[in-house]
Every structure is written in C-alpha cells, then in structure tokens.
C-alpha cells in the first residue's frame, strides 16, 4: 500500500519533507518512525488524514501521515 | 510588599494637569494589576455611554505586578480603555521593554484623561513628568517618531511608545506601538490615543522593582526557568521557528482559513510556513524583556528587513487574502509596524474587502484601478498602506471589516465576533476554540483562552478537537487562567510550560502575599465577570456571543476537517451555567456575591 509521510520542523533535519512510501499491510506509525530514527517520545503531534493518531495507529492505503515534534505559537 | 510601586500617574490632557495617587491596594488584591485592575478601575470611573473617541473616554496603560521584576517574560503591560470598535473593555497586551521602564520610573499605571488642544507627547524621567509639543512628530511614522523622540529626550535608554498615522487618522484598526515593533494591537486602541491628540509617551526610569521574598524567588524562578527550558514548545519549537511554525500544523489539521474563510485547507501552505521563513528569511531572533523564549523574528525580504512576521500576520496577509508571496507578506506586516496597525485586523479587513469585490458588491470604479482580488499580492500591500492613511477606499477599510461589510449590506462577510476579526483558526474544526471566540469578552480573539493548546498541540493534555465533551469547563478555566496571566505581567506563551501553581508561587514570592491557587484563579474569574458586566451595560446580549453565520451553517468544503460546522448552540447554555450566568448570559447575583464583585 502507498502512504504519504510528511515531516515538519526539526523532524526534517537530515530526513525529508514529504515522501511516498510503499508499506506492507498492517504497518503502524511506530514502524514508520523507527527507520527514520524518530523516538515515540519525540512525537508530539501525529495526524493521520488530519485526525489525531498515535504510534500504535495502523495505516491504510492512501493515507497521509503528518508528524510534528513539540511546537506551538499563537 | 513587593512588585507594585504603589503609585499611579494620572494625566488630564485637557487641563494639562499631572498628578500622582496611591494604588488602591484593596482592589489590587482582588484584581491583581494590568488587565484586571485597570479593567475594574475603567468600569468604576468611565460611564457606559461614553463615546470611545471622545475626551470622556479614559485610557489606562497598566503594568503587571511582576513587570520589571526578574520573573521570566515580565516585560508586559496592558492598554485598557473603551474600544472604539465595539464598546467593550479593550485590553491590548504588549511586550518589549517599555512596560518595565515605566515601572523603573516608579509607576504601576499611567491614566490618560481628556484631550490635548494640539498634538502632544509625554516625557517621563522618574518623578519628572512633562507634556510636550508633538508638532515635530505628528504625521510621522512609528520608526521616525521613535528616533526623533529618543534624540530629543537625549537618553538612549529611554523607551518610546507611540501611535503611527493610522492612530492619528482614528482608524479602528490602529494599534499602539512600543520599542519599534511591539504592538498593543487589537480593538482599535491606537485610535483612542489619537483622539486624545497624544502621539507618544517616552519613559526613562532609574529605580528598581523589589521582590518581597528574594530567597523564595530564587527557588521559584529556577523551577520556572527549568520548566520553560525543558518544555518542547518554549524550549525548542518557539525559539527555533517562531510562531509561524503553526502554519503547517493548523493547515494539516484542516482549520487554516483561506480566502476569508471560504476554504480551510491550503495546498500551498508550505510556501509561507515557519520552516520556509526560517530557511530563507530569518536574520536573527528577538526577545522581550527578561524572556528566555525569544519567539520574536527579525527577517529579510526582497528590498528590506524588519521584525516579524508572526503566525497571525503571515496568515492574515497571506492565505486569508489568497497570497503566497512571502516578500509581500513581510512588506504588509512591516507597514503595520511602521504605520501603527493591528496586523490581524488589517489583513482580515482586506480579505473581507476581497470577498466583497469577488461577489460584485464593491464596484471597480471605487478602487482607483488598484487590484483588490484574492491572490493579488501587490494590491494587498497597496491597500494596507492606503488603509493606514485613510486614502480613498482605504478610509472604508480603516473602519474595520464589520463596518466595511455592513456598509455594503453584507455584514455576514465579516469574519468577526463582536466586530473584532477572528484570527487564524477556523472554529468549525476546533469546537472549544470556537466557543472561546464566541464568548471572549473583547470579541474574536485567540489569546483570551487559547484552546488550540489542548485541542491541537496536546498541552497540557490532548483533547479531541471535534468533540464537545468537557469543552465548556476547559474554556472557562483557560479564560480565567489567561485573565490571571494577563493581569500579572507575564507572557501567555509561558503557559505552554507553566501551570497555575507556578504563577501562584511567583506572585507570592514577589508580593509577599499568600494566594492559594484557587484564590488566584478566582481573581481571573472576577476579572472575567467585570468585563462581562461592561458588555452587558453597553447593551450586548447573548445574541452577541456568536460566530459569523458561515462558520455555523456552511460545512468546511474540503481538507482534513471537511464537513464540520461549529456547534455553538449545543455548547453555549452549558458554558453560561458553568460560569454561574443565567440563560441570558447575565452573571447571577449569587455568582457576583461569591466572587466579591
Ligand atoms: S515569548 Fe515572545 S512575545 Fe512572549 S515575552 Fe518572549 S519574545 Fe516576547
């Protein structure tokens, strides 16, 4: 299945902004961040198709996953 | 007693009379300082039916009890007066260095009454206070005025607070600027200063603000600083990217308004993101007095450099106007700093005007050939300038988006609450934040209870942004806590890292008082209720606690929050009950008695 991974803020350093990945069925968020060397504790905001998700959420074909470290403003 | 100087400076500009009076400590204990104390004094001293731009309106420039101490971010002050935009108690917050300097000069607050016969400015050096002729600087922009008055004052350490041309022409989008780039931005406070023929206040203080318990303060401070440093937002996210880092988060959440809230997802958001700004435009970071966070930006653009832009201005002059040209956004933001305008409302007013043009309500012959279409960056910049000077159609823009849209028979196209423009979060996809827009005493404002923090950022805990559950309680607590932070002189951004008990500990160490957490939070509740009473006595009703019809009725058309509307009618009665207000949104006698209002 094809999933779009978007990284933001410091997660982009030495990685990428956006990438389409071919993943096997049953892949969860943790399986995506581990090879990227992102720890689950560093993950502050995890949006799957714009909705809240977490490291255990299972991905589906056509999903967009957006990952953010702690950031804020106002 | 520490923190407070105990002295208030009262200046009657009509009579040219300068006097000092002791701070009312009994009131200060109940209403703290800043927004709370000045709001209460305004409520008691200024009649409900006063015209905001008449000499009878009074302006309170009030520091916080912590302003000028060594508490982190303690440089803040509040401008409190009747808002010419909507008649409520305007309390516009600013940072920088001016507030601390006023405290060093020995004053908790400056009260400005009446109207000078001709343009003047006020010069303060400790006990020496003078009203001086401002003929040389009237008509000048904020940068030129600041430079000229500093030179005339002859002390480089003096701090300048001033209005620009927008305040002089009484634009309802006019801000009061200090330290060049910092703004008491919202509610049209710059026009009130302009209506008093008061151009600027220059202040130099040589005193100190004392802490009642210096030893306790050491411990309390090191704990607070540690939390600010360790927190991912205040210790890393904000310092690295500034507030514009929100562009991508808010957009990916599907609540990033585009083209005057006609859409809420922007496929081109990356072009104006905080990440892009940091990579291509950032020159250096900037911090207010005693701030370890340093969220301020100093940036370059094609042909210039200057402060900002912040997230809200990036959005208001950018995607809300359909613009994705960072240079143009910078220029418009710089015009706001230079000419003294609220960069949120100025951009939102142009976005409203663009929709009026798009729908054919504004006729092309009114526009002198200057484009006013979504996506036209050049036109957006030129209309920003013309708004500040009130030139041609710019004079209509200067009245703010609500009066503009109303004058064409379509007030529903103003994306405002109580005539104050809603900032950069579409409430349809964030229910608690939408409730807070609708119930904010000053109107469409994001910093009266920043529900984005729990609903998007997960601080202090993650709430489902689309759910209604528990939201009325959260909104009330956030509004009350914000009233506390606004009334002690610290920056709201510290609340990403600090909680109520941290603020209580700091206030107690500085003042020597013994507030409990509950007592301090009750001060916030009290402050909120006094502001509410002002809204009621000028004739506002529950019908004013609402959102623009588009946000209640038209589902978000596309993007991650597609299909959402704001469900205000389901929340409002429970919110009133939570506050101890009756079904008409009026505080009950029992509520007021319990709070000691
Ligand atoms: S966090 Fe930003 S706005 Fe707040 S005091 Fe620091 S520099 Fe100023």
Image (cartoon, grey):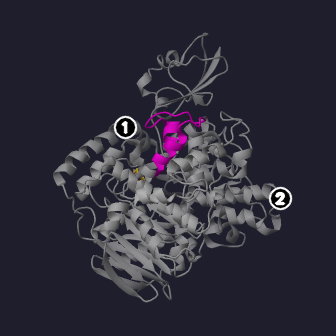
Q: Is residue B249 magenta?
A: no
The residue carrying mark 1 is B231
Q: Residue at x 62, y 55 (%)?
A: B545
- Front residue of B306 and B233: B233
Distance of label 2 from label 1 (alpha carbons): 49 Å
Quadrant for the C terminus of chain B, please. bottom left
What residue is shown at x 52% (from left), y 69% (from top)? B189
Q: Residues within 10 Å of mark 2 (few under 14, many from 20)?
A: few
From this view, report whether residue B176 is shown above or below residue B560.
below
Q: Nearer the viewer, residue B284 or B358?
A: B358
Q: Residues within 10 Å of mark 1 (few under 14, many from 20)?
A: some
- Can residue B210 be seen here? The reply is yes
Q: Position of residue B60 (x, y in %)?
A: 43, 71
The image shows residue B546 at horizontal and vertical percentages of: 65, 53
The answer to whether residue B456 is left or right of residue B417 is left
In the depicted structure, whether residue B248 falls above or below residue B81: above
Kindly identify which residue carries mark 2. Answer: B360
Magenta residues span B452-479
Q: Mark number for residue B287?
A: none
Picture quarter containing residue B25? bottom left
């Amino acid at each position: 299945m094809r999933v779009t991974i978007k990284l933001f803020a410091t997660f982009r350093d030495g990685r990428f902004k956006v990438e389409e990945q071919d993943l096997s069925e049953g892949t969860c968020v943790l399986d995506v961040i581990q090879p990227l060397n992102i720890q689950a504790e560093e993950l502050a905001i995890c949006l799957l198709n714009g909705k809240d998700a977490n490291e255990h959420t299972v991905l589906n074909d056509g999903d967009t996953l957006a990952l953010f470290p702690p950031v804020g403003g106002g | 007693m520490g923190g407070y100087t105990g002295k208030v400076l009262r200046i009657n500009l009509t009579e040219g009379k300068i006097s000092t009076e002791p701070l009312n400590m009994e009131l200060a204990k109940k209403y703290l300082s800043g927004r709370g104390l000045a709001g209460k004094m305004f409520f008691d001293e200024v009649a409900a039916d006063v015209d905001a731009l008449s000499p009878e309106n009074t302006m309170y420039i009030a520091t916080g009890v912590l302003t000028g101490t060594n508490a982190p971010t303690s440089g803040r002050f509040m401008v409190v007066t009747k808002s010419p935009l909507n008649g409520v108690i305007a309390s516009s917050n600013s940072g920088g260095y001016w507030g601390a300097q006023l405290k060093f000069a020995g004053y908790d607050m400056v009260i400005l009454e009446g109207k000078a016969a001709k343009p003047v400015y006020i010069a303060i050096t400790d006990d020496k206070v003078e009203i001086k002729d401002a003929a040389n600087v009237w008509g000048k922009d904020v940068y030129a005025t600041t430079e000229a008055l500093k030179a005339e004052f002859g002390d480089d350490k003096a701090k300048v607070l001033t209005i620009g041309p927008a305040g002089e022409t009484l634009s309802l989008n006019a801000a009061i600027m200090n330290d060049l780039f910092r703004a008491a931005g919202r509610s049209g406070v710059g026009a009130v200063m302009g209506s008093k023929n008061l151009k600027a206040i220059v202040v130099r203080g040589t005193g100190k603000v004392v802490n009642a318990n210096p030893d306790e303060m050491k411990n309390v401070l090191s704990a607070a600083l540690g939390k600010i440093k360790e927190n991912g937002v205040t210790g890393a996210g904000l310092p690295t990217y500034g507030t514009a880092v929100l562009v991508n988060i808010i957009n990916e959440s599907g609540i990033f308004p585009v083209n005057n809230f006609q859409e809420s997802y922007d496929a081109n958001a990356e072009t104006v993101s905080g990440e892009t700004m940091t990579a291509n435009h950032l020159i250096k970071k900037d911090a207010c007095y005693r701030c370890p966070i340093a969220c301020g930006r100093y940036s370059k653009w094609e042909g210039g450099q200057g402060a900002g832009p912040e997230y809200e201005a990036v959005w208001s002059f950018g995607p809300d106007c359909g613009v994705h040209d960072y240079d143009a956004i910078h220029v418009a933001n710089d015009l706001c700093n230079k000419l003294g305008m609220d960069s949120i409302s100025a951009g939102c007013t142009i976005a409203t005007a663009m929709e009026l043009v798009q729908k054919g309500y504004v006729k092309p012959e009114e526009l002198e050939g200057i484009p006013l279409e979504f996506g036209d960056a050049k036109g957006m910049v030129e209309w920003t300038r013309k708004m500040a000077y009130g030139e041609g159609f710019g004079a209509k823009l200067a009245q703010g988006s609500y009066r503009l849209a109303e004058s064409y028979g379509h007030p529903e196209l103003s994306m405002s609450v109580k005539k104050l423009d809603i900032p950069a979060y579409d409430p349809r996809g964030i229910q608690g934040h939408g409730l807070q827009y609708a119930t904010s005493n000053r109107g469409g404002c994001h910093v009266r209870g920043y529900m984005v923090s729990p609903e998007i950022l997960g601080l202090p805990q993650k709430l489902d942004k689309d759910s209604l559950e528990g939201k009325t309680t959260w909104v009330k607590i956030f509004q009350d806590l914000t009233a506390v932070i606004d009334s002690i002189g610290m920056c709201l951004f510290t609340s990403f890292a600090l909680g109520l008990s941290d603020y209580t500990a700091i206030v107690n160490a500085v003042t020597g008082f013994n507030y409990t957490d509950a007592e301090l939070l009750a001060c916030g509740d009290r402050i909120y209720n006094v502001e509410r009473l002002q809204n009621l006595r000028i004739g506002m009703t529950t019908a004013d606690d609402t959102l623009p019809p588009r946000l209640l009725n038209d589902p978000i058309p596309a993007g991650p929050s597609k299909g959402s509307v704001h469900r205000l009618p389901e929340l409002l009665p429970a919110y009133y009950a939570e506050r101890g207000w009756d079904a008409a949104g009026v505080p009950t006698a029992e509520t007021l008695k319990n709070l000691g209002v």
